[in-house]
Image: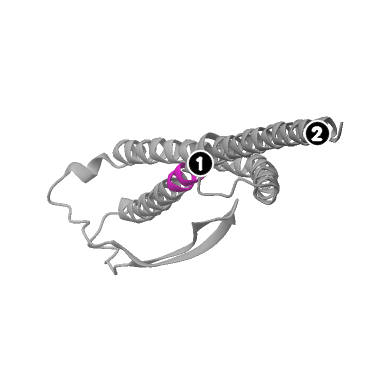
């Protein structure tokens, strides 16, 4: 059984509902495509970041081969002290933004440590910063993936369920009203024929 009344008032409401759904669908689909574009950008940036980190690590290995010497202790030279984050609104989705990083450099004697340790400290900071940026890029990607998934579900809901169902409701009401109108015409004709027969019978009796 339909969950709506089979009358002209209900037909008008369903038609207005259909107009609203068809008006909203293009904007939802546009937002879905914009989010998908942003997601593809985020995936590209994430891939580039991973490649850049791998290149940096390889460069450190070539530039500072002496790190392989076990007797040289460089642990604790660089410590990530604070990460300052912000947010940006991208197509209605809030995404994390890395604003600033601060490091603490352990004190070390210039005599006790070789000269290349200064270079190492700089490269270690770069590596840590890369890893933090990658983590943020990963988080942005995950949020955008969820947003695209939700928006795709909404578009599919409108496109494959709500709009077809509303069109079907309109068709059901139109068929019902059409049948009711035809039945009313038939009843009217039958009533007219009955009156005519009654009038004719009365005239015969009067003769």
Q: Which residue is mark 2?
A: 205
Closest to the observer, 155 or 95: 155
Q: Is residue 153 above or below residue 124?
A: above
Is residue 115 toward the left or the right of residue 146 in the image? left
Name the residue furthest left.
Answer: 71
- Tell me if residue 151 is in the magenta stretch: yes
* Residue stretch in magenta: 145-152
Q: Residue at coordinates 43% horizontally, 36% vertically from top-left?
A: 47
Quadrant of image for the C terminus: top right
**Rendered residue at 67%/34% (across/down):** 183
* Residue occupied by mark 1: 157
Please state the horizontal and vertical placement of residue 56, each as a whole percent of the image: 38, 40
Residue at 18% from the left image edge and 42% from the top image edge? 68
Comparing 87 with 57, the one in front is 87
Residue 106, quarter of the rendered image:
bottom left
Q: Position of residue 168 (x, y in %)?
A: 57, 35
Within the image, what quadrant is residue 103 found in? bottom left
Q: Is residue 71 above or below residue 153?
A: below
């Amino acid at each position: 059984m339909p969950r709506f009344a089979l009358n002209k008032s209900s037909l008008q409401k369903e038609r207005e509902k259909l107009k609203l759904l068809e008006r909203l669908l293009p904007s939802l689909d546009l937002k879905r495509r914009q989010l998908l574009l942003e997601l593809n950008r985020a995936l590209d940036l994430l891939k580039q970041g991973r490649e850049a980190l791998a290149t940096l690590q390889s460069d450190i290995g070539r530039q500072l081969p002496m790190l392989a010497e076990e007797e040289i202790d460089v642990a604790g030279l660089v410590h990530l002290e604070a990460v300052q984050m912000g947010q940006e609104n991208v197509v209605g989705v809030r995404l994390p933004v890395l604003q600033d990083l601060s490091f603490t450099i352990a004190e070390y004697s210039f005599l006790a440590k070789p000269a290349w340790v200064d270079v190492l400290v700089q490269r270690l900071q770069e590596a840590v910063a890369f890893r933090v940026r990658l983590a943020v890029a990963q988080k942005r990607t995950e949020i955008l993936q969820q947003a695209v998934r939700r928006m795709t579900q909404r578009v599919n809901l409108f496109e494959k369920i709500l709009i077809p169902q509303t069109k079907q409701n309109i068709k059901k009401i139109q068929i019902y009203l059409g049948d009711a109108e035809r039945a009313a015409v038939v009843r009217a004709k039958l009533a007219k024929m009955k009156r005519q027969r009654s009038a004719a019978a009365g005239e015969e009796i009067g003769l």
